Amino acid sequence: MALDEAQGGSTVCVTADLLDADLRLERSGTEDAPIRLLGDGATVRSLTVEDEEHVVVEGFVVVDGDGIVLSGRSLVVRGNEVRGAELDGISCERPCADVTVEGNTVEGTDGSGILVEGERITVEGNTVSGSVRRESGDADGIRFFGTGIRILGNTVQDIKDDGYADPPHTDCFQTYDNSRPPTVGALIAGNVCRNVDHQCLIATAEEAGTAGEVGRSRDIEFTGNVCDVEGSQAVLVQWIPGVVVRGNTLTGPALDRGAIFLDGSTGAEFSDNEVPAGLVPYQLDEESEDGFSTDEPG
């Protein structure tokens, strides 16, 4: 197939449905001449770009396979639709750097709709819905790990824990450090999270906390998001210092508090957020009090 012969500057167009095809690209473009894979609405089972650079994947419908699986540098995944994937819908790991995932629609995938790990990755303007747990450990919207991650203007919705013997912990945005790299300097801004059964953001670093290395993951900015969730809090931060929660709308029928900071999550900020009248805006334990700032009355 043309994928085997692609080189810098090539554009490979798939114009017919290949319902049983698992496309794989193992070639790189260059900064000035990327390889472009264009789907033009064609349906495939899965699409993999493995350890490559300067590749654009655009316009595919990916159904019932492994989703879109990426690794490498300077990759762009834009305007695709992923449904019913047996793995995370769109993933970039092992690790990835200078990657953009934008304008995609991901529905009903096993695990996370989008999962990114690495450096300088932007996840922008995507819609994720209906994640489920079949073989995966959980069902979430967007998971993120690494340094300089930007999650901007996405919509995550309709991820439920009904109908399971052992329900998943469904969240919109999640990071943790168990068997993952630390998360440092992430920006999560302008997103919408609704009809999800637990947190809007859950950010934890249990591995670092257990090792006495709190601060290995740090400095997450969560600003201007709209969260309407079913959990006890919209934001949960544990073992991660320097988390800013600012200018968000935090609502939900089961909320006990807007946000909670635990186990050395020092230097946090909670300001200019909207929470329902009468609700406790935030809570923090003694280990997280140092450097905390808020505009809420004491």
Image: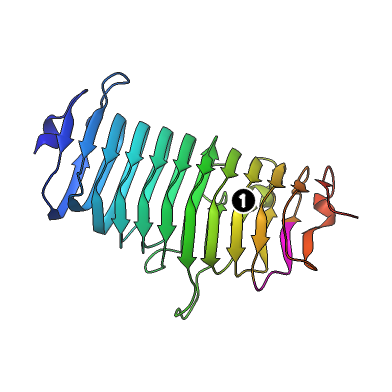
Residue extending farthest right = 298
Quickly name the residue at label 1: 207
Query: Left of 251 or right of it: where is 37?
Result: left
* Secondary structure type for disc 1: helix
For residue 218, what is the image quadrant? top right
Q: Is residue 180 visible?
A: no
Query: Magenta region: which residues?
Result: 253-260
The answer to if 97 sits in the magenta stretch is no
The residue positioned 44% from the left and 49% from the top of the image is: 115
The residue positioned 67% from the left and 69% from the top of the image is: 232
Query: Left of 236 or right of it: where is 39?
Result: left
Give, as a three-letter code, the residue at label 1. Glu
Residue 153 in percent (x, y) is at 51, 46
For the residue pair 271 and 37, the one nearer the viewer reads as: 271
Quadrant where the image shows the N terminus: top left
In this rendering, the answer to whether 119 lies above or below 39 is above
